[in-house]
């Protein structure tokens, strides 16, 4: 092994000497040294080619390694950009959805003649049958306890407390919640109570009142419009409880507002000058009319059979 090392060192030393001689002859130039220079070139060129063949793959390896690192950086950057674009698209969609909800809520308020302060829900509290939400507007915006809270679909609840820049709202599904209502299209009055779940109980004060599935209810309005202003849509009857001999009529109501997906609300800080009555109720979707076109199939007309001629 030591002998091989010495031989390799000797060969390397000879190559270095030859290279130095070639450089010296090149620097000197002239025709005098052209012969030795050609001889050295003939000796060195094959060695250079061998060295080049040996080192070229190594150079390519390091070059490819650099390119791989560069490509990896580009891929990482593209991945990060793509992730950022997806997040922005989701954010834009959410912002657009909030803008639509705010627009619908303000349209309802304008149609009813309510002066409102819009707010965003910042918290939800659910303890047993208690249901409250926190909003990001408070007394600095003119919000006080016992004010009506609405959303795009209708009644959400009433303000129970207000801080400078926030307020707490008792929502319509809370078990302690009660609101006087009127059966749309009639003068029949009743009381809506929360169940602590997604539906409400309706108790009509007159047991003889005719109530059907699909009937709609609006807030009757409180004295002085507190805590409830009149005309706010409340919900729709989904079932009627038959209780013969009862002094009141009972039904189950589904609220118009979906509290599970609620995000934007408005607090009514000034009541309407006149009761909007039933004008704020959601308009029924028109039933599509199916048109069937029947094309009559032409029938063959029988040709008269010629009678035989008399000869």
Image (cartoon, grey):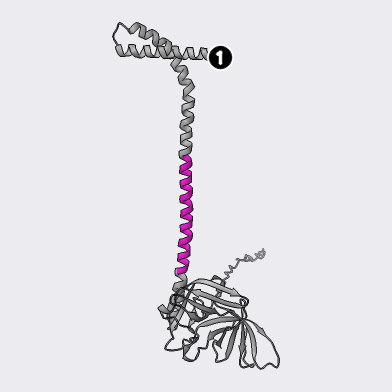
Q: Is residue 241 above or below residue 32?
A: below
- Residue 54 spot, x, y in % from top left: 49, 21
Residue 8 against residue 195 in the figure, above or below? above
Q: Position of residue 243 (x, y in %)?
A: 70, 89
Q: Would you place residue 304 above or below residue 108 in this image? A: above
Query: Which region shows up in magenta?
Result: 71-98
Quadrant, the C terminus: bottom right
Front residue of 296/288: it is 288
Residue 202 in magenta stretch: no
**Quadrant assignment, res 257:** bottom right
Q: Residue at x 42, y 88 (%)?
A: 273
Residue lying farthest to the left in this orientation: 30
Q: Mark 1 falls on what kind of element? A: helix
Label 1 belongs to which residue? 2
Q: Position of residue 300 (x, y in %)?
A: 62, 65
Q: Position of residue 114 (x, y in %)?
A: 43, 83
């Amino acid at each position: 092994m030591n002998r091989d090392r010495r031989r390799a060192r000797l060969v390397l030393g000879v190559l270095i000497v030859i290279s130095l001689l070639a450089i010296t002859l090149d620097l000197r130039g002239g025709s005098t040294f052209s012969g030795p220079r050609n001889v050295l070139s003939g000796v060195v060129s094959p060695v250079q080619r061998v060295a080049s063949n040996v080192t070229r793959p190594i150079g390519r390896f390091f070059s490819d390694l650099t390119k791989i690192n560069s490509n990896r950086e580009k891929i990482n950057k593209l991945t990060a950009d793509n992730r950022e674009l997806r997040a922005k698209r989701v954010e834009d969609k959410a912002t657009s959805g909030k803008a639509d909800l705010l627009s619908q809520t303000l349209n309802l308020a304008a149609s009813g003649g309510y002066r409102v302060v819009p707010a965003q829900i910042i918290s939800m509290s659910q303890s047993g049958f208690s249901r409250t939400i926190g909003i990001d507007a408070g007394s600095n915006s003119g919000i006080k306890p016992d004010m009506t809270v609405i959303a795009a679909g209708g009644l959400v609840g009433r303000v129970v407390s207000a801080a400078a820049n926030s307020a707490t709202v008792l929502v319509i599904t809370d078990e302690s919640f009660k609101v006087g209502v009127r059966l749309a299209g009639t003068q029949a009055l009743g009381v809506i109570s929360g169940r602590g779940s997604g539906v409400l109980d309706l108790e009509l004060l007159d047991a003889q009142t005719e109530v059907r599935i699909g009937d709609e209810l609006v807030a009757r309005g409180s004295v002085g419009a507190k805590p409830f202003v009149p005309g706010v849509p409340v919900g729709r009857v989904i079932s009627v409880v038959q209780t013969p001999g009862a002094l009141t009529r009972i039904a189950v109501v589904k609220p118009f507002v979906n509290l599970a997906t609620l995000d934007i609300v408005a607090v009514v800080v000034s009541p309407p000058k006149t009761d909007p009555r039933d004008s704020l109720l959601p308009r029924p979707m028109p039933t599509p009319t199916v048109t069937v076109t029947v094309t009559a199939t032409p029938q063959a007309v029988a040709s008269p059979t010629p009678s035989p001629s008399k000869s």
